[in-house]
Image: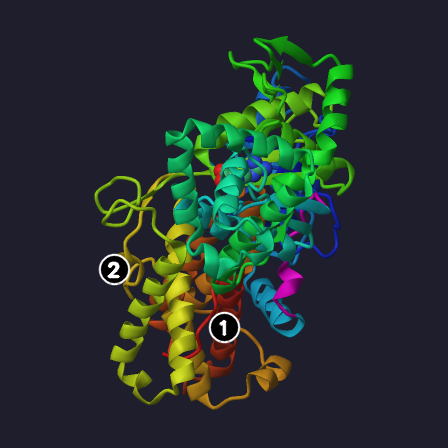
């Protein structure tokens, strides 16, 4: 079945015909021409082209066009002259316009058209990338501006591993879209506007009647502060009442309360920033409070459209398929998470002109997103058809589990502090780096840099390589293993390729200018083919919002390089040295781009 993502992929096929970098898209263009010729009466048929590497292991070809069967069921009764799917397939093949891309074609089974790419063409494409740069391989996406709403921790509450997942996944999605020339608004939708502030502020006033005097050192650990105030809130009814009044006074804009609120937010922010800095993630904070002034107007608009109903004292929106309504004004008259999200969506669509709004949170929030997206569709803000833009997408992810299979916690069942976690990743990887002979005489700075690159890279990759919807187990030993599908293995594989190039003593820039790539050996061809598929993989990963697709590609690249190419094709000192060094360089460049997109710093030495 054609998924929405696929349909979208195909329907945007005709953007920028000439400089299309995806092999799949180029072939699809050729097949589109052929289909128009083959069945002139069916001008809406879109070409379905897929890479064969996963299905038939590339035995019959590199790509396949799968239109014949579906097309046959459409034209069966009509006077087209074809006598069944194989005949349709044959015609599709014959009508393909001549192209330097294609070496040969064949029709298999019930009409699959198999394409073998020309190895000279692949070689040409590779050389051109080496000269013009990998950015010429950026995919084309059907959007200009996107919002990626990610990380988004809550002020004063814990920033937990779930927020770490959101930060890592969101950053990668943003990087992939940015690489594809989409303008990305990286939004940190921090929870800076909730009833918890009444309690925090009152507690703060007890300790510091003058909020000016408060600083991070005075409060100490903000999470501990939150806990202590919560304890007080739950046990002292008089305090509870004061806290509830404090919310009203804060939201009414009373100066002393605003100041205290600001202070608490600032302290929280410094804490978050430490994590972002370590991870190399940039984000622009537009917290919940930012959208607060927009809520009344937005709710008026929804009310005027007849969407808002009264229910048990609250104001709600009913949506199809869910039996509870979306509450937009609580019975006490206050706004909530949903009212803020509606206002934020309105702002992103109308003020920021975003065409794709992506929310990265755990799957537990799926119903919230489902309901408010449906409300936005009812309001006519978003088209009902999910394959059209503007579009809002919830990117859900599973839990991070500990060794015991339960939610990841520290030994004393506390939430894991992210800074501690990153510290441990770094110190473990530092130990491993120092154990390697080669690193014995590295300067301290180099050891530190490598330990960080490998340690943080390992944490990120262990997260990103899984299908994001599934839970995964957090295990330092596993993620820092230098064998298997880990960042460590991949970073070392990259460093090894760089060292091959260094050892050759050749100037790669010179080779690029005067050299030639030849893909006569099966290993060379397999590597070359995988390399030129980079663009379509990034496109697929972006359209489906699945970083794991890119991780699989990277892991396979390293595998193909080692097992198919390097173990069969001598590089240094062989007659094919120049061509093979260029292949090594192209591999290193593509690997580095993958690392970059995954937010991982490369290492060049081991
Ligand atoms: N602060 C929320 C949380 O920690 C995540 C916010 C996600 N973004 C949004 N627009 N709702 O669960």
State the residue in front, 47 or 14.
Answer: 14
Looking at the image, residue 322 lies above or below residue 222: above
Q: Where is the C terminus found, in terms of image quarters?
A: bottom left
Looking at the image, residue 215 lies above or below residue 194: below
| Res 59 visible | no
Q: Earlier in the sequence, mark 2 or mark 1?
A: 2
Which residue sits at x=27%, y=46%?
402
Secondary structure beneath disc 2?
helix
Which residue sits at x=57%, y=49%?
265
Looking at the image, residue 600 lies above or below residue 284: below
Residue 443: name its quadrant: bottom left
Q: CA distance from mark 2 to mark 1?
A: 33 Å
| Secondary structure mainly formed by the magenta segment | loop
Circle 1 residue: 583
- Residue 348 has which mark? none
Which residue sits at x=75%, y=55%?
18
Q: Is residue 501 left or right of residue 437?
A: right
Q: Position of residue 84 (x, y in %)?
A: 55, 25
Q: Is mark 2 within 8 Å of ligand 1?
A: no
State the residue in front, 387 or 157.
Answer: 157
| Res 261 visible | yes
Q: Residues within 10 Å of mark 1 (few under 14, many from 20)?
A: many
**Mark 2 touching mark 1, by CB under 8 A?**
no
Q: Position of residue 62 (x, y in %)?
A: 49, 51
Residue bounds of the magenta highlight: 133-143
Q: Position of residue 391 (x, y in %)?
A: 66, 34
Q: Position of residue 404 (x, y in %)?
A: 21, 43
Magenta-drawn stretch contains 135: yes
């Amino acid at each position: 079945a054609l998924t929405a993502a696929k349909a979208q992929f195909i329907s945007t096929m005709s953007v920028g015909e000439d400089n299309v970098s995806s092999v799949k898209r180029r072939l699809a263009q050729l097949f589109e021409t052929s289909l128009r010729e083959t069945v002139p009466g069916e001008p809406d048929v879109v070409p379905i082209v897929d890479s064969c590497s996963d299905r038939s292991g590339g035995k019959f070809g590199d790509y396949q066009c799968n239109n014949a069967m579906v097309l046959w069921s459409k034209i069966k009764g009509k006077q087209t002259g074809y006598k069944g799917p194989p005949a349709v397939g044959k015609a599709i093949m014959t009508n393909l316009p001549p192209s330097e891309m294609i070496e040969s074609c064949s029709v298999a089974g019930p009409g699959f058209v198999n394409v073998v790419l020309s190895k000279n063409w692949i070689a040409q494409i590779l050389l051109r990338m080496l000269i013009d740069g990998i950015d010429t391989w950026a995919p084309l996406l059907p959007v200009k501006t996107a919002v990626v709403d990610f990380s988004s921790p809550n002020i004063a509450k814990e920033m937990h591993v779930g927020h770490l997942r959101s930060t890592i996944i969101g950053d990668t999605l943003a990087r992939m879209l940015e690489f594809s020339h989409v303008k990305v608004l990286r939004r940190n939708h921090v929870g800076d506007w909730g009833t918890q502030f009444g309690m925090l502020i009152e507690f703060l006033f007890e300790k510091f009647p003058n909020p000016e005097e408060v600083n991070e050192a005075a409060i100490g650990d903000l999470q501990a502060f939150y806990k202590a105030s919560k304890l007080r809130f739950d046990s002292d009814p008089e305090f509870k009442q004061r806290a509830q009044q404090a919310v009203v006074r804060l939201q009414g804009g009373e100066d002393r309360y605003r100041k205290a609120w600001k202070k608490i937010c600032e302290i929280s922010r410094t804490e978050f920033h430490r994590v972002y800095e370590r991870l190399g993630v940039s984000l622009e904070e537009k917290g919940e409070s930012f959208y607060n002034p927009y809520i009344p107007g937005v709710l008026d608009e929804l009310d005027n459209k007849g969407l808002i109903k009264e229910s048990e004292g609250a104001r709600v929106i009913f949506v199809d398929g869910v039996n509870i309504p979306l509450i937009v004004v609580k019975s006490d008259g206050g706004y909530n998470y949903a009212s803020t999200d509606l206002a934020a969506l309105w702002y992103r669509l109308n003020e920021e002109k975003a065409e794709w709004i992506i929310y990265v949170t755990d799957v537990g929030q799926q119903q919230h997103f489902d309901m408010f997206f449906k409300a936005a569709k009812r309001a006519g803000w978003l088209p009902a058809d999910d394959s059209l833009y503007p579009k809002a997408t919830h990117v859900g992810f599973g839990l991070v589990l500990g060794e015991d299979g339960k939610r990841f916690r520290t030994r004393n069942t506390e939430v894991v502090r992210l800074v501690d976690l990153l510290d441990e990743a770094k110190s473990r990887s530092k130990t491993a780096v120092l154990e390697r002979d080669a690193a014995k005489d590295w300067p301290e700075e180099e050891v530190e840099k490598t330990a960080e690159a490998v340690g943080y890279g390992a944490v990120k990759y262990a997260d990103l390589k899984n299908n994001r919807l599934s839970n995964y187990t957090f295990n330092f030993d596993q993620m820092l293993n230098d064998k298997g599908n880990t960042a460590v293995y991949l970073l070392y594989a990259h460093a090894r390729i760089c060292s091959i190039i260094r050892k050759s003593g050749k100037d790669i820039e010179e080779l690029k200018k005067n050299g030639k790539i030849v893909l006569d050996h099966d290993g060379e061809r397999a590597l070359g083919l995988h390399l030129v598929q980079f663009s379509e993989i990034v496109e697929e990963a972006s359209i489906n919002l699945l970083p794991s697709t890119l991780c699989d590609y990277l892991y396979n690249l390293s595998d193909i390089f080692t097992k198919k190419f390097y173990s069969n094709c001598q590089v240094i000192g062989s007659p094919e040295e120049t061509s093979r060094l260029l292949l090594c360089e192209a591999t290193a460049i593509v690997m580095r781009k993958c690392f970059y997109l995954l937010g991982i710093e490369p290492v060049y030495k081991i």
